[in-house]
Image (spheres, coloured by chain):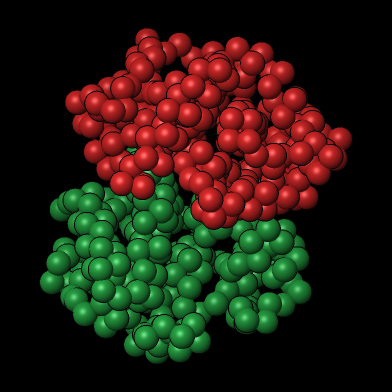
Chain colours: A red, B green
Amino acid sequence: MAVVKLLGAWLSPYCCRVIWALKLKAIPYEYIEEDLSVKSPLLLQCNPVYKRVPVLIHDGKPISESTVILRYIEEIWPQNPLLPSDPYEKAVALFWIKFADDKSPSISKLYRTDGEEQQQAAKECSEMLEIIEEHGLIEGKKFLGGDEINMVDIAFCSVAHWLGVIEEFAGLKILEPHKFPKLSSWIQNFKSVPVIKENLPDSDKMVALLKRRREMLLASKSN
Amino acid sequence: MEGAVVLLDFWPSMFGMRTRIALAEKEIKYEYSEQDLWNKGELLLQMNPVHKKIPVLIHNGKPVCESLNQVQYIDEVWNDRAPLLPANTYKRANARFWADFVDKKLYDLGSKIWKTKGEEQEAAKKEFIDCLKLLEGELGDSLYFGGKDFGYVDVALVPFYCWFYAYEQCGNFSIEAECPKLIAWVKRCMQKESVAKSLVDREKVYEFVLQLKKLYGIE
């Protein structure tokens, strides 16, 4: 039986993406929590280009970058498919996954910045949400993937969970239910899926850590 | 796989060139439609409402957006000839990783090189060369990034060569001096008809960059 290992960090949405994919496909794996302030030799060896998590190690071979990992998992373990098989539908899904990859960093900018920079990040987040609400969600479908959760839903995890946590402690309100009814409904559906619900980082722990990080970042900026 | 293929594109776009190369590799007949990006047409806005950007590949009336997505789509639909992605799953993941690396790094760094001056430009130049050197490392002694065959990462990267001259002129440096192996690889790729007919003249790109600088009021 091939060995699957995942180098991750509990707070990272990109690591959660991989965890959910592995669990949705019932693939056993060994999880190794990385201390990102002191990166392990294994991490640096497996991901010399970016030196970051997640890294999937399958049969001793490393794969980095969460979207590349998700595609790999999908191809090696095709059960419970997370992408459409039709080439056109797949291309549409991949378009949204890239959109999520490109735009999600605005969400973490919200806690890393203040003043004008934070306002700009909030504007970018709002624009991203407007696009998903208008173009990404199909009326009457529970998920971005349609009737079942798929890789597109997983890719937008930062919107589903991290955004809400950051909004609360940063005192921002961007994802208002009356402005984004379809998106709000999607978030509830997404977080109700058992694999997702049981594998979301604890909000209180997240707030504590993000608050500390924010203080450190803003202090070092003013120095 | 039958059905009309249209490409909405803009001649100097390194992203559009990727799709042109993929279509040429597979010998797919298509209609090339040059777009005016300062006066975007209805079709472009309708086919890519989210980004309103080129290239857009339209197959049987349905749009595929994002150049690497288009290359993968073309490879999947016209899968009976000139494969671009490797058959081996791990090698395929590796190819996606490096194409994604090109996407994440080169365009933004290249833009900084022609748009900025002084310290910012120097930092961009250094990081740009570092990225190219990493790519040289990945290429190793192979003919192509795809090994002995031209493949996905080659398609993703080679169009940037058209912009190297503009970066060099604006940044006052030589990419070939820093990355000779990469330039040797470019020359190998240019011997392929699909690449030679899809890439554009680098001096024309430089003229275009100078026009953009004037337009944006950049020195």
Q: Is residue B61 above or below residue B191?
A: above
Between B39 and B88, the residue placed more toward the observer is B39
Give percent across and percent down for residue B160: 36, 69
Q: Quadrant of residue A193?
A: top right
Question: What residue is at 53 percent from the left and 50 percent from the top?
Answer: A115
Q: Which residue, as the protein is rendered here, is positioned at the far right?
A: A140
Q: Is residue A22 visible?
A: no
Q: Is residue A116 above or below residue A85?
A: below
Between A177 and B77, the residue placed more toward the observer is A177
Question: What residue is at 76 percent from the left and 39 percent from the top?
Answer: A176
Q: Is residue B44 above or below residue B34?
A: above
Q: Which residue, as the protein is rendered here, is positioned at the far front?
A: A223
Q: Is residue B182 visible?
A: yes
Q: Quadrant of residue B143?
A: bottom left
Residue B163 shown left or right of residue B214 in the figure: left
Q: Classify the position of the C terminus of chain B by image quarter.
A: bottom left
Residue A137 shown left or right of residue B213 in the figure: right
Q: Classify the position of the N terminus of chain B by image quarter.
A: bottom right
Question: What residue is at 69 percent from the left and 39 percent from the top?
Answer: A173
Give percent across and percent down for residue A41: 19, 26
Q: Is residue A83 above or below residue A222?
A: above
Give percent across and percent down for residue A60: 27, 22
Numbered disc total:
0
Give percent across and percent down for residue B121: 28, 70
Residue B82 shown left or right of residue A129 in the figure: left
Between B166 and A162, the residue placed more toward the observer is A162
Between A128 and A25, the residue placed more toward the observer is A128
Question: What residue is at 25 percent from the left and 68 percent from the top?
Answer: B119
